[in-house]
Image (spheres, coloured by chain):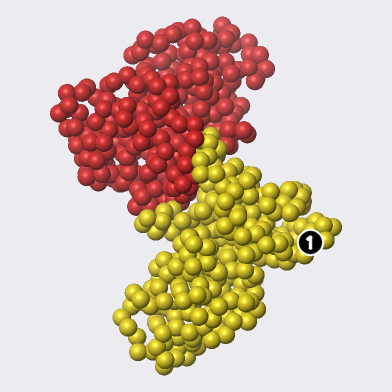
Chain colours: A red, B yellow
C-alpha cells in the first residue's frame, strides 16, 4: 500500500510575525511517496531533484518519521519514502519542512490516523531540528495544517490555525544565492527596543485581526517588520528594489520569506500577484541574477494525497 | 439642549497587549452632562466626586473638547460640561480617559455627529496627553468604541475594534494606594530580549485569535505578560497573591490594569467573576488594605447616552 503526497512550500517569519506566523503555499511544493512495507523501520529509498542523504537518521523526513514511530507501539511492518524535491534547499520557503511534514503525514495516513494534523507538528519539528539546529514549528505547522498558522507558544506547543481570506495570493521570488540560516541568524540582535517591540506586537494583532475579518487593507498595513527585516534584508541582493516594485505593483505587503533569501509579497487576486511576479522578475533580470518565482494561492489544506 | 452620559472605565495594557490592547467596562464609569449653551467656548461648570480643575485648559475633558472644536468651523454657541466622577484618579482603569471620551462624544452628539466614534479617538487622546504627558489611545479607544480595541499604530493612528465574546467578564480590584503613572513608567526597561518579545507577540496574536473565535481557553492561555508585569507588579501590594487567587477561583487570566495599581482578571460567566471578586477581597481584607472592587461584563458600546 502506498500513497503519493503533495508537500507544500511555506512562508515563515511573516514580517511582524517573526518566529510565530507562517502560511502554506499551494503550487510550490515537493512530491513524496510513502509506502507500507513488510520490513520494519523507515527507509528513504529514492531522492530525486536534490543531493540529500538517504540515511534515515540524516534525512529530515526520516528523523521526523522516527520521532513519530517512537511514540507508538512497535509495528511489525515498516515504511519506505521516495522524495521528489522541487523546493530548493536554502530557499527560505520551507524545503526541509515540506519533507518532514510529508513523512509524518503519510505514515499517519497509512496507520489509519492515530494522530491529528496538529499532533503531527511536534514530530515534524524534529526534522527541522536536524536541518537547522532548532525545533522550529513556523514552517511545519502551515505545511501540515494549511492556511495561516500562529505558533502562540512552544512550551507547551500551542498552534492556532487561521483561515486565509479567499482572494489572498502570495508571490515569492527566490534569488539563487546561498544564504545560510546560520548567517541569517547571526545578524539578529539579542535585544530589541521596547518601542519597536510594541510596534511589532501591534502589527501582529492587526494581521491576525485582518485575517479573521478578511480585511485585505488591514492585512497590508500590518505587514511591517520593525525588528528583523532591517537586519536581514542587507544580506539579500536587490531586496529594497524588489520590495518597492512589489508595492508599486499592488502588493498589500512584502518581506523576507523564512530566513531568506526568498522575498514574498501578498496581494489580492491572481492578476495582481502575476503582475508583481513580472515586476520582480524584471528586477533580477536587470541584475543578471538567476531566480525562481512562484505565484500561489494560500493553500487551505496543507500536505495532501494526490 | 443637554444629554447625560455614562463614561465607562477601561482596562488598558491587557497583559501581552502592553500599549496596544484595551477593553471597555460596563458597570464602572463616570457620568457627565454635556449641554449646548449660547455662550461660545467650553466650560466645566461642575465636578462632583473628585478634586479636579474647572479651568477648561487644565481639565482633560476641556482639552479634549477644545481639540475637537478646533477642527470645526467656529460655532456661534458653546458647551457646558458637568462631571460626576466615580472612577478614582490614579486607579489604573482610565479615569481621565472616561472624562476625555465623554466630552468629545457628548459634543459630537449635540453637533449632529460630524465625526464617527473612531474619529473622536484622536481628540480624546489630547486629554490623555494632559493627564499623563503621552497622547495614548489605549484607554480612550475602548471608552469610545466599546469591546476590545487594538491600537495597531499611532502614526498613522489605526484602531481596530474587536467584539468581546458574550460571556466574558472582568473583575477589577483597586488597592487604594497611590501609584503614579510616572513611577510605573520609570521601572520599564528601554530594551527587551528578542526572545521575550517573540513570546509576547505570539500571545498578542493568540489573544486576538481567541477573541475572534470566542475561544475562552485560548484567551486565557494568551493572557501572559513576559515584559512589563514582572517589572511593575512589585509596585503593587499583594499582586502575586491576588493573581494566584484569581486563577485558583477560575480566572482565564489576570494582570495589571493600565499602569496599576488595579489588578484585573478575566473569566467566563458572572458567577466565576463574582467568586474571583470575593477571593480578591479576602486577600486585601487580610492585609488590612482598603480597596474597591468591580465586576463587569465587557461593555460592547462604549460611552453612551443614559
Q: Residue furthest bottom?
A: B38
Say if A228 sits above or below A174 in the image.
Answer: below
Say if B129 sits above or below A218 in the image.
Answer: below
Residue sitting nearer the eye, B49 or B86:
B49
A180 sits left or right of B171 in the view: left
Q: Residue furthest right?
A: B286
Write down the residue under mark 1. B289
B261 sits left or right of A14 in the view: right
Percent position (x, y) of residue B6? 57, 76
| Element type where label 1 sits in the image | loop
Say if A270 sits above or below B32 in the image.
Answer: above
Residue placed at 37% from the left, 10% from the top? A51
Residue placed at 70% from the left, 54% from the top? B236
Percent position (x, y) of residue B3? 51, 85
Percent position (x, y) of residue B48? 63, 82
Q: Is residue B142 visible?
A: no
Residue sitting nearer the eye, A6 or B155:
B155
Amino acid at each position: 500500500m502506498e500513497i503519493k503526497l503533495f508537500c507544500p512550500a511555506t512562508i515563515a517569519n511573516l514580517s511582524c510575525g517573526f518566529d510565530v506566523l507562517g502560511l502554506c503555499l499551494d503550487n510550490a511544493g515537493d512530491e513524496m511517496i510513502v509506502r507500507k512495507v513488510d520490513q520494519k523501520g523507515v527507509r528513504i529509498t529514492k531522492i530525486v531533484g536534490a543531493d540529500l542523504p538517504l540515511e534515515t537518521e540524516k534525512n529530515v523526513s526520516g528523523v521526523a518519521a522516527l520521532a513519530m514511530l517512537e511514540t507508538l507501539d512497535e509495528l511489525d511492518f515498516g515504511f519506505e519514502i521516495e522524495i521528489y524535491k522541487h523546493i530548493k534547499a536554502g530557499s527560505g520557503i520551507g524545503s526541509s519542512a515540506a519533507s518532514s511534514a510529508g513523512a509524518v503525514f503519510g505514515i499517519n495516513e497509512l496507520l489509519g490516523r492515530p494522530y491529528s494534523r496538529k499532533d503531527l507538528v511536534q514530530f515534524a519539528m524534529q526534522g527541522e531540528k536536524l536541518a537547522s539546529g532548532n525545533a522550529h514549528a513556523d514552517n511545519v505547522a502551515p505545511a501540515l495544517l494549511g492556511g495561516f498558522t500562529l505558533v502562540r507558544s512552544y512550551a507547551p506547543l500551542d498552534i492556532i490555525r487561521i483561515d486565509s481570506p479567499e482572494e489572498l495570493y502570495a508571490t515569492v521570488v527566490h534569488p539563487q544565492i546561498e544564504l545560510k540560516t546560520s548567517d541569517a541568524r547571526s545578524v539578529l540582535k539579542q535585544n530589541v527596543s521596547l518601542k519597536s517591540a510594541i510596534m511589532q506586537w501591534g502589527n501582529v494583532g492587526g494581521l491576525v485581526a485582518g485575517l479573521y475579518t478578511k480585511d485585505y487593507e488591514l492585512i497590508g498595513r500590518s505587514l511591517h517588520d520593525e525588528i528583523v527585516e532591517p537586519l536581514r534584508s542587507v544580506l539579500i541582493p536587490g531586496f529594497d528594489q524588489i520590495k518597492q516594485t512589489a508595492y508599486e505593483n499592488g502588493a498589500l505587503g512584502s518581506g523576507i520569506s523564512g530566513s531568506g533569501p526568498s522575498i514574498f509579497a501578498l496581494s489580492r487576486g491572481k492578476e495582481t500577484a502575476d503582475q508583481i511576479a513580472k515586476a520582480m522578475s524584471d528586477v533580477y533580470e536587470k541584475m543578471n541574477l538567476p531566480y525562481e518565482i512562484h505565484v500561489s494561492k494560500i493553500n487551505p489544506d496543507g500536505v495532501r494525497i494526490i
